[in-house]
Amino acid sequence: MTPHPNLLRVNQLPCDAFERALLPVLRHHLNDYADPRLASGHRAFVVAVERWGEPIGLSVAFHLQKLVRAILQCRPEGLEFHDPLCLDSKEAVTDDERLLIDMLHHMRRDQTARARDRVYQITDGRMDPDVIRTGLQFAQRFACGVSGEMRPRAAKPILKVVR
């Protein structure tokens, strides 16, 4: 599918590079739920591991899979998304994709009112506790640092002898 010229582009999303990189993983998960015969869910994990390495990538893909499943419980008709393998629509974003990325963007920054509004929109007016819980779990695991990028886990404190 060739994207409409007026669609929002990925680089126009008001989010950081980490959040933009979630889009292909989300698309593969959505594609897997739309047609399980494609086994696109497996590809979501592969893409995430290629992007962030095994420890982070597997966790990203797992948490996003849980979030997509929770959202689809509220939206059984599914979400509108671009084919993750289509090069023509790779840089375009549907309204549902934008809402989902925007919801995670606000949750990662603890912007409660805006995150709540996006949850309401992405779930067609339901403040579903599973969507909120899984979104917040993702946001807590991959919270933003000062630069707006993914914050690494805190290192263990090192004891030093001071003389």
Image (cartoon, rainbow, N blue to C red):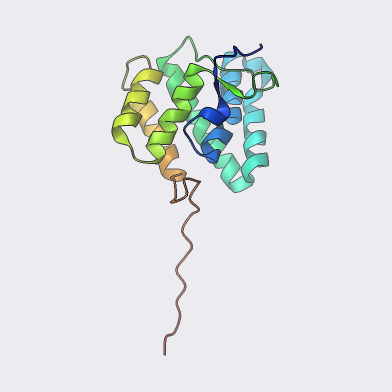
> Which quarter shows the C terminus?
bottom left
Q: Residue furthest left?
A: 113
Depth check, front residue: 102 or 66? 102
Q: Residue furthest bottom?
A: 163
Query: Residue 4: where, in percent of width, then height?
Result: 59, 11
Residue positioned 50% across, 29% down in the render: 13
Rendered view: 24 above or below 150? above
Q: Quadrant of residue 48?
A: top right
Residue positioned 43% across, 14% down in the render: 75
Query: Residue 157: where, in percent of width, then height?
Result: 44, 69
Q: Residue furthest front?
A: 6
Query: Residue 46: where, in percent of width, then height?
Result: 67, 35
Depth check, front residue: 8 or 81? 8
Residue positioned 50% across, 13% down in the render: 78
Left or right: 44, with 141 as reference point:
right
Left or right: 67, with 88 as reference point:
left
Q: How many marks?
A: 0
> Which quarter shows the N terminus?
top right
Query: Residue 124: where, in percent of width, then height?
Result: 37, 14
Q: Quadrant of residue 58?
A: top right
Q: Quadrant of residue 105?
A: top left
